[in-house]
Image (spheres, rainbow, N blue to C red):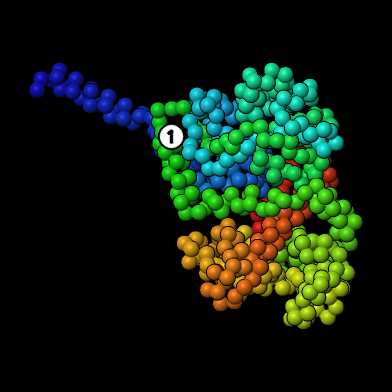
């Protein structure tokens, strides 16, 4: 080989290896290399919220699980307005959007959506002091606002073609929570929220009601930038499929959205009134008893409210009595000599609840451990075990409350209870019991958070539930 040819050959070999060194990493490799997944989201009860214990929310937890599966840390960035969520490109810092985005035809031209992981409907919200609109044609008020860039606005534009008198305003410098608050304060007549949003905030706004669903169910998914590189997207699709098949997704949905939706206006208002009139003199007792037995005092108070509405003189036809509605046998076992004495009753109830929690197998994680302990508090540990065995026999997971609560009602059916060790039980009651306790616990967290915010003068657009165990 001539010297000139050898020089050319060496040059091209060097150029090849040099270009290989500067070859751009795939989106998945970039995340792994930097050890961090960056997620764009928004502050909302259904997505990401922050309290004194740290961040929480469905999207926060779902995205965090994905980061764990990749073996990297996670960092969240926040959109300044809703429209910014739709402007994700490969040039931006965030790797994808996890913000409860609906998959719509228009958005498919801007973003690459994963398969959906749950569904919501769009609901028109109004104050119960104004006339309820019964159809889209009655939404003619000048005080009807929705978020600009939202699927709510997109849907209104779609239906307006057949309802020419429909009128609304689109605002970009606001949030869903702020619009809901404006309806509550009579500054707006209507707004639109997703069904899961209203489920989480309804107890804070008992005067607000759903007029009607303005859309068919819409699918919610993560959104990635449009790109030729699908490596991170494909990994996200694989992850979502895996947690759907192993039941983790269903469990996560139950954790955040699965508690009772049935408490009506009267029930919410009654709870709030009792929280003002009855709870203050009992709060210290709840806190001391909870500290002694390593419980959350708000959980203990929620159980007491479900039992007696914090009425120290409560007596049932079956003979249970007091704030914690203890039976004679349980009271004796817990060294309670006077069931109508509030302090004795609460301490006895706290001790008994702690024993129920300890009886649940250690392999069962929170919050499932607490929900099952509450069910056994109501129906007895033996019947709970019967339901768990039926759950396993039916191919479901006996260690997950979301599966066990589907099988507890079977204990009232002869076809099923004759197969069990402890026989017949009113299996629907513990399911309702646990869901109600979860709802009261949630409302207590909201009230406590609002009290703290009032002292610290925090912005009202930052309501918080509570991340302390057990999370909702």
Q: Is residue 236 shown above or below 111? A: below
**Residue pictured at 86% horizontal, 65% vertical:** 311
- The answer to which quarter of the image holds residue 372 is bottom right
The residue indicated by pointer 1 is 27
**Residue pictured at 62% horizontal, 59% vertical:** 367
Choose between 302 and 214: the one closer to the eye. Answer: 214
Relative to 137, 408 lies left or right: left
10 Å neighbourhood of mark 1: few (<14), some, or many (≥20)? some
- The answer to which quarter of the image holds residue 193 is top right
Q: Is residue 202 shown above or below 335? A: above
Q: Where in the figure is residue 252, as x and y percent of width and height?
A: 57, 51
Choose between 366 and 396: the one closer to the eye. Answer: 396
Q: Where in the figure is residue 355, as x and y percent of width and height?
A: 67, 73
**Residue pictured at 59% horizontal, 37% vertical:** 217
For label 1, the SS is helix
Choose between 62 and 129: the one closer to the eye. Answer: 129
Q: Is residue 179 shown above or below 270? A: above
Q: Is residue 399 visible?
A: yes
Q: Where in the figure is residue 254, as x and y percent of width and height?
A: 60, 52
**Residue pictured at 51% horizontal, 61% vertical:** 397
Q: Is residue 461 shown above or below 414? A: above
Q: Where in the figure is residue 14, as x and y percent of width and height?
A: 25, 26
Q: Is residue 30 visible?
A: no
């Amino acid at each position: 080989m001539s010297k000139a040819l050898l020089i050319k050959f060496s040059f091209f070999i060097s150029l090849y290896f040099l270009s290989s060194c500067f070859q751009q990493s795939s989106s998945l490799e970039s995340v792994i290399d930097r050890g961090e997944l960056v997620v764009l989201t928004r502050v909302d009860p259904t997505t990401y919220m922050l309290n004194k214990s740290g961040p929480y929310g469905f999207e926060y937890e779902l995205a965090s699980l994905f980061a764990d599966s990749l073996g990297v840390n996670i960092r969240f960035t926040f959109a300044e307005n809703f429209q910014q969520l739709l402007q994700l490109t490969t040039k931006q810092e965030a790797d994808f959007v996890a913000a409860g985005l609906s998959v719509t035809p228009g958005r498919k031209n801007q973003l690459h959506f994963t398969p959906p992981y749950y569904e919501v409907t769009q609901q028109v919200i109004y104050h119960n002091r104004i006339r309820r609109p019964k159809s889209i044609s009655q939404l003619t008020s000048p005080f009807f606002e929705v978020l600009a860039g939202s699927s709510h606005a997109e849907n209104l534009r779609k239906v307006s073609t057949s309802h020419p008198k429909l009128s609304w305003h689109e605002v970009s410098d606001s949030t869903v929570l702020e619009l809901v608050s404006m309806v509550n304060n009579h500054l707006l007549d209507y707004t639109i929220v997703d069904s899961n949003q209203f489920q989480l905030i309804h107890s804070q706004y008992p005067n607000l009601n759903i007029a009607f669903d303005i859309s068919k169910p819409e699918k919610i998914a993560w959104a990635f930038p449009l790109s030729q590189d699908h490596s991170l997207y494909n990994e996200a699709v694989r992850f979502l499929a895996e947690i759907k098949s192993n039941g983790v997704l269903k469990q996560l949905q139950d954790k955040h959205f699965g508690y009772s939706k049935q408490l009506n206006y009267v029930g919410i208002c009654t709870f709030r009134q009792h929280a003002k009139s009855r709870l203050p003199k009992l709060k210290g007792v709840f806190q001391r008893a909870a500290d002694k037995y390593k419980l959350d005092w708000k959980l203990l108070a929620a159980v007491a409210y479900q039992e007696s509405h914090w009425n120290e003189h409560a007596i049932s036809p079956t003979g249970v009595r007091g704030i914690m509605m203890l039976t004679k046998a349980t009271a004796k076992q817990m060294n309670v000599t006077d069931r109508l004495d509030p302090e004795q009753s609460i301490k006895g109830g706290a001790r008994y609840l702690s024993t129920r929690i300890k009886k649940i197998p250690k392999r069962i994680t929170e919050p499932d451990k607490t929900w099952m302990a509450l069910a056994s508090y109501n129906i007895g540990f033996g019947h709970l075990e019967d339901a768990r065995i039926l759950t396993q026999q039916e191919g479901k997971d006996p260690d997950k409350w979301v599966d066990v609560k589907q099988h507890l009602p079977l204990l009232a059916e002869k076809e099923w209870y004759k197969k069990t060790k402890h026989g017949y039980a009113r299996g629907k009651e513990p399911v309702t019991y646990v869901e109600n306790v979860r709802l009261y616990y949630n409302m207590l967290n909201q009230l406590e958070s609002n009290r703290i915010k009032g002292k610290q003068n925090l912005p009202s657009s930052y309501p918080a539930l509570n991340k302390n165990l057990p999370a909702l």
